[in-house]
Image: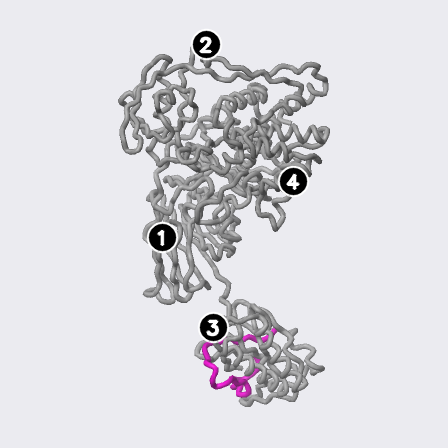
Amino acid sequence: MPVLLGAVRARVVPVNVMRVAQAVVEVAARVTRVPPPHRIGRVPAGVPEVANGVAAMEMPGHRAAVAERVRVPAAVQVRAGRVMPMADESREGHDGQTEEAQQQCQEIEVHMSFRSQSWMFGSNVYYAAHIGWIHSDRDRVTPPGRCRRLGRAAALGCCLGALLAWSGFVPAPRPRPTLAYTLQIDSAHTDVLDVAIRFRGLPATFLLAMKRHAEYNAGYWRYIEGMRVDGSGDDDAAGIVRMDSTLWRVTLPGGRGVLRYRLRVQPPADPRRAWQTYVRADGALINPPDVFLYLPTLAGTPVTVKLRFPRSWSLATALPAAAARDRRTARDAATLLDSPILLGRLRHWTFQGGGTRYHVAYWPLPDAAPFDTAAFVDGLRRLALAATGVFGRAPSPVYDFLLLDGAGDALEHGRSVTIGVPSAALARDPHASLAEIAHEFFHSWNLVAIRPARFNDLGYGQPARTPGLWLGEGVTLHYAEVLPRRAGLVPAAPSRLDHLVELLQAYYGSPALLRVPPERASLAAGDSPVTNPDATGGYYLQGELLGDVLDARVRQATRERRGLDDVMRALFLASREPSYGGFTSESLVAAFDAVCGCRLDAFYAGEVRGAGPIDVSPVLERIGLRLVLDSVPAVDSAGRPLPDGRLALDFSAPPGVLRLVVNNPATPWARAGLRTGDELLTIDGAAVGSFGELRTALSRLRVGDRALLQVRRAGEVLQLPVTVSGYVRPRVAFVDAPGVTPAQRARRAAWLAGE
């Protein structure tokens, strides 16, 4: 039964006016004593499109007929429509209508549509009105009694509703947008990546952005080439305008089309950073923020990713698999951009633990050193169990370790971690990298799940600052030390006490760490010490010390029933709440107080927010030790005086620029007139262009040597002679406290084991 359908233009209006349109249908139904339309819902996928105001759908058992009783006002412009027979249950119970009468009728709907998008009366998403019951008897349209009354009622309602719609009272939202990425990796051309994004159902104009990571940002917006659009409703009118370094405005007529661009893969640094995008003939690491642009206004839209890569490669990523080997899905932009992709001639292992399935993927160098893989994977398994013991569960039901040979550095994610793990080191010791792995793995809880408020939120602008990095980075260092000990993966020497000695000597030997409190140092992360004296990076070491102190304070307050593990578990549980937006200083203090049943606000104000110094006496008291602190000349293992090499660099400087940081007035460098911000050019006439070259040059110096440094200051080149001297360093030692008890000794043994 072919049926003519009309459709009308619609504009967005308030919801209360939409309800008026629905009421029109119901009033008309009362006038004719026919029940109102009772079935309102979404139009399912696959409903045939209608063009030029006409749709034809063959109804089995009926001959073609024209639905003359279905009319719309002449003033209404007919654009497009769809026809859909209602489901069987929608034909039941119409005012006692018999089954025979129901069989004589066919339900038909008018769908209001705009740009071939169908919507229905009755809700703020889809709107529909029943037009009537039309019975085809050979070539005539003969609506029976009840069908006739319903036809008149619905026709009246439809006419009035159509007038409202034509006047702009019924909204017509766009269909659900779809985003499909395609990434082409060519092993023969390792310097480029080709990306395409297929859009459907989008506004005609939208923004496209590149995410800026709060800590690890390679700035790949500088390496995008050939951005263009094709396949839109009008390619001549389509266009792309760059609004800022990381932001573009796209014009896409019809809301559909394909945007394409090419990325120039940058040569790796030395050493190569494991988290940065890198392509070789035998594989690739894709860091999504470097590669995939996203839509800020549609960041919650699910996406698909198709990966085109050599058939000999395998794939590892936390992104869920779709129907095919080369397809992945992401529930939103944040998930896509937080899921690195490792491809190549990989080695794979899996293990189970704590209800989570772990996948280990290792990308070896072509000349990789062989190592004991069974011992290595077993170490990961034991480490994972120790970490989940803190929180009670893993960050996700499936977790990926993405490990790269020939690289350093690492980056944590919610469901995976990317780490450089050299095979040469594993050949010497299969547990060689476990401290670094523990650190990054723990970050998946502490910094990704338990995150400072607004830290690393999805965005393309300057990342928000946070005072909480002492917890996210420093306390994570604390657990990187204790978790391998709990897992039984490190030897007894050097001990945890030896490690604490090193921390305290570094802390007491740095005037900057004693001057700038952890919260202020956290807020200055990423800044240059030249412009912000608080940019010490001290929150790492300070936070690690605070982890020990907080653990001791909570244990003392709860008589050893609770500790820092319980605080971290409480913070993790809070992060799972739908309303979680990150922690603040106030919420941290509240969490500490709730776990220990005490008040730690004075401690927090003095040692976290304030300049301290950090007091480690609670740690030592519970394990029966006393601190001895003095100063001694710095000497090597043979007792020879060490030259003072305490000269730091500003790592926020551009590559190839060595900007000095001189923050200790007692050093020979400060006494010679060097200042923070001086750009180092040469030492004794030899150019110095990297941190490694600087360390090599300083290692050649001996006490009493005279070095000539050439620096640039405010555009002027200066020659500054420096007489190298020795230096005095703090010395830390621990001795038994007077009257140490057996309980304290027992706690000391547990503490040394990482508990």
Q: Residue furthest top?
A: 639
User: Helix or strand or loop: what does disc 3 sit on?
Assistant: loop
Q: Where does the image place residue 696, in percent across and percent down from the top left? A: 36, 22
- Looking at the rendered structure, the secondary structure element under dot 1 is strand
Nearer the observer: mark 2 or 3; the answer is 2
Identify residue for label 2: 639
Q: Looking at the image, is mark 3 or mark 4 nearer the viewer? A: 4
Tell me if label 1 and label 3 are in contact, CB under 8 Å: no
Q: Secondary structure at mark 4?
A: helix
Is 64 contained in the magenta span?
yes
Magenta range is 60-86
Which mark, by number, is residue 590? 4
Q: CA distance from mark 1 to mark 2?
A: 61 Å
Upstream in sequence: badge 1 or badge 3: 3
Residue 703 placement (x, y as % from top left): 38, 13
What separation in Å lies between label 1 and label 3 (alpha carbons)?
Answer: 31 Å
- Identify which amino acid the numbered label 2 is placed on: Gly
Q: CA distance from mark 4 to mark 2?
A: 50 Å
At which x and y percent is residue 707?
31, 18
| Residue 338 place in picture, x, y as percent | 49, 45
Label 1 Cα neighbours within 10 Å, binned few <14 / some 14-19 / many ≥20: some
Q: Which residue is mark 1?
A: 261
Q: Which residue is mark 3?
A: 114
